[in-house]
Amino acid sequence: MQINSFEAYQEAYKMSVDQPEQFWANIADKFYWRKKWDNVLSWNFSEPNIKWFEGGKLNITENCLDRHLEKNGDKPAIIWESNDPEKPSVTLTYKILHEQVCRFANVLKKNGVVKGDRICIYMPMVPELAVAVLACARIGAVHSVIFGGFSAKSIADRINDSACKLVLTADGSFRGNKQIQLKEVIDDALIGCPTVEKVIVLTHTRTPVSMLKGRDLWFEDEIKLVDTDCPAEEMDAEDMLFILYTSGSTGKPKGVVHTVGGYMVYAGYTFLNAFNYQPDEVFFCTADIGWITGHSYIVYGPLSQGATTLMFEGVPTYPDASRMWQIVEKHKVNILYTAPTAIRSLMSFGLDPLKGSNLSSLRVLGSVGEPINEEAWHWFDEHVGNSNCPIVDTWWQTETGGLMISPIAFVIPLKPACATLPLPGVQPILVDEQGNEIEGNGVNGNLCIKFPWPGMLRTTYGDHERCKQTYFSTYPNLYFTGDGCMRDEDGYYKITGRVDDVINVSGHRIGTAEVENAINMHAGVVESAVVGYPHEVKGQGIYAFVIFPNLHNEADLTKKDILQTVTRVIGAIAKPDKILFVTGLPKTRSGKIMRRILRKIAEGDTSNLGDISTLLDPGVVEEIIDKSKS
Ligand code: 7RM
C-alpha cells in the first residue's frame, strides 16, 4: 500500500484514473471488513449521490484497535503530552486504548445511546477525547466534535442542527496560561438544547462546576460501573461516522458528513503514503481534534495503521517558544505535521528556542491549513528539518476527509511552498468563472475535482440541498473546492487561497457572513462588512467595516464591546483584528457590497481600486480610504 518511487506513483496514479474501482478495492482490501463490499463505487455529482464499498460491513474501531492487539498490543497507540511540561506524559498502548474505548462505549450504552444517535463532544485535548471519539464509533453513534474555542451559542446551534442526545465534556481545559471553563460554556449552551438528555463530565482542571440532577454525570463515577467487554457494532460502509461543522460563504456552519468505510480507507491510505510512515515511528500532528486534521491525522489515520500518535494538550509557545522542540526531543518524534501559522509564530522568536533541543529524530515534516509562504517553508526546512527532511505541503479540506494534493515524502520531487501533485485517486481540474476547463500548464483557475474519492463528504447534515448548492452546483458535475489554484510549468499545483467569502485565520475557516451577522447583533450597529487581509502570523486577519451612527466619544470602548459580542455569538477565534467605523459601505445599485474594494482598502492598496463606476455612491470609498489611513 506504500508508494516508494516516482515510477510507482505514476503507475498508481494511472491505475486510479483508468480503473478506479480496482485501484480502491486493492487498497480497501488491506483493512479489516466483517463482510466485503458488493459494489466499490456508484456515484453522480448532480444530486449528489456517492457510495463507496456498498454492502461492506465493518467497524472502524476494529481497524483502529482490535486488529493490532495480537501483534502490537503493547505498542504505544497514543502518547499524550500535557500542557504543563512538569506533568508526566501518558502512554496508552493499543491494549489499554482498546480497553478504555470499550469501557467508555459501555458508559454511552448504559446511558441510552444507540447506533445512529448524535453525540456532541466538547473536551480538552486529553487522551479521553480520543477515547470518546472512538467509543462513539465503537457503538455506531455519530460524533460531532466541537473545538474548545467556540461559544455557547455556536455549540447550541450545532447541537440543535443535528439533535444531539448526549454531550461529553470536562470541567475545563488548559491552553497555555489560559483556562477555558468548558462545563460552564456547555451549561449556557444547553439552556436552548431540548434534545440533550445527559451530560458526562470528565474531571481535568478541578475547577468547581455545577452538576444538574438527572442530567449531569461524572465520567469517573460512570466508568466504574461498566466492564471492559464491548463488541463493536457492525456498520454498513455508508453508515454515518461523524459530523464536523465548517464555515462557508453563506449562512451558518454546515455539518459535513463522513461515512465509515470510505473515510477509513482514505484517511489510512493517505496517512501511510504522504508521510511515509514507518513501523515504530512517532507521528506528531499539532492540530486540535476539534478540526478535521485532528480527526484524520491524530485519531483515525494513524490508529488505522497501527501507528504511534502523539497528542499535545497545549500550545507551541507555552511555557515558551521552545516547547515544540522539547516535545520532539522528549518523544523522539519522527514526523511532525503542523500549520504555517505555528511556524510563523515560532519564527518570530528567532533561533534561540531551537538551540537546546535535539531534533535529529525528525525524518518528515508536514504543513496544512493555509498556503505556506516561502519564508516559512525555508525556515522550517533549514532550522527544523536541518535541510534533510522532506516537507509535505498537504492541501485538503474538512469536506475531502483526507489529503488531496500533496507531496509523497521521498517520492515526489519538492518545490518550496507547493502542494505539488494530486495523490492517486484525486483528479483535479482548473476552471474559469464560466466553468470552462483551463488546460495546459502555467495557468490559474478555480480548483475543482472531477471524480469521487473515498474520503469525500456525502452530505451536509439534515440539508442535502445545501450540500448540492455549495459544492456541486457552481460548476455542473464537478466538486468545487472554493480555492484558487495555479498549475505551474511543470504541472505542479500551488493553492493560492479561497476565492469565496471565507477567511482563513490561523488555518481556521471563518465565513465573512457569520462574522457580519455577529457584529450586526450588537446594539447600535446598523450594518457591517467583513473581509480578510494579509496578516504576518495568522495568514489572514479579519477586518470589519462597521456603520455605527451614534458613536460616543469613547470609540475604543465600543470596539471592545463589539469584540465581546462576536466572542459571545461565535467564539474568540472570530474576533476581528481591526474595526473601522464608517458612515457607508460601497454598494452596487442592486445593493450588493463590493468586497473587492474593501479587500483592497484592508490590504492598504488603494492605488488601483478598479472600476467603481457601478457604485451607488462612489463618495463613500473616499471616506473609507481616508479613515483607514488615519
Ligand atoms: C485541512 C483543513 C480548508 C481550506 C482549504 C484551503 C486551506 C488547507 C492548505 C490550504 C493552501 C494548503 N481543512 N488549505 N491546506 N491552502 N495550502 N496546504 O485545513 O476545512 O479547515 O480548511 O484551508 O483554503 O479550502 S479546513
Image: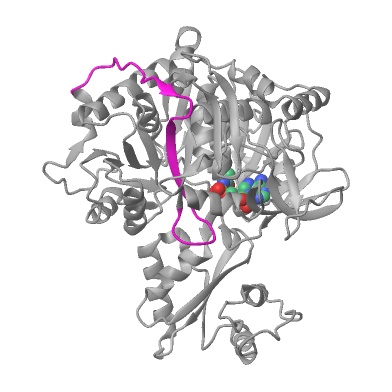
Give the answer, above or below, for where 262 lies relative to 550. Answer: above
- Residue 417 is at least partly visible in this image: no
In reply to whether residue 230 is colored magenta, the answer given is yes
Give the answer, above or below, for where 61 lies relative to 351. Answer: above
- Residue 187 is at least partly visible in this image: yes
> Hey, which residue is sitting farthest top in the picture?
70
Q: Position of residue 567 (x, y in %)?
A: 39, 64
Q: Position of residue 18 (x, y in %)?
A: 76, 27
Left/right placement of residue 160 relative to residue 147 reads left
User: In which quarter of the view is residue 400 placed?
Assistant: top right
Q: Position of residue 166 (x, y in %)?
A: 26, 40
Q: What residue sits 60% from the left and 46% below the top?
A: 339
Q: Position of residue 369 (x, y in %)?
A: 60, 48
In the rendered view, how is the structure colored?
one colour
Q: What residue sits 25% from the left and 43% below the top?
A: 206
- Between residue 368 and residue 105, name the one nearer to us: 105
User: In which quarter of the view is residue 620 placed?
Assistant: bottom right
Left/right placement of residue 433 relative to residue 69 reads right
Q: Quadrant of the N terminus?
A: top right
Give the answer, above or below, for where 393 lies relative to 102. Answer: below
Q: Which residues are magenta?
A: 225-253
Q: What residue sits 40% from the left and 90% below the top?
A: 550
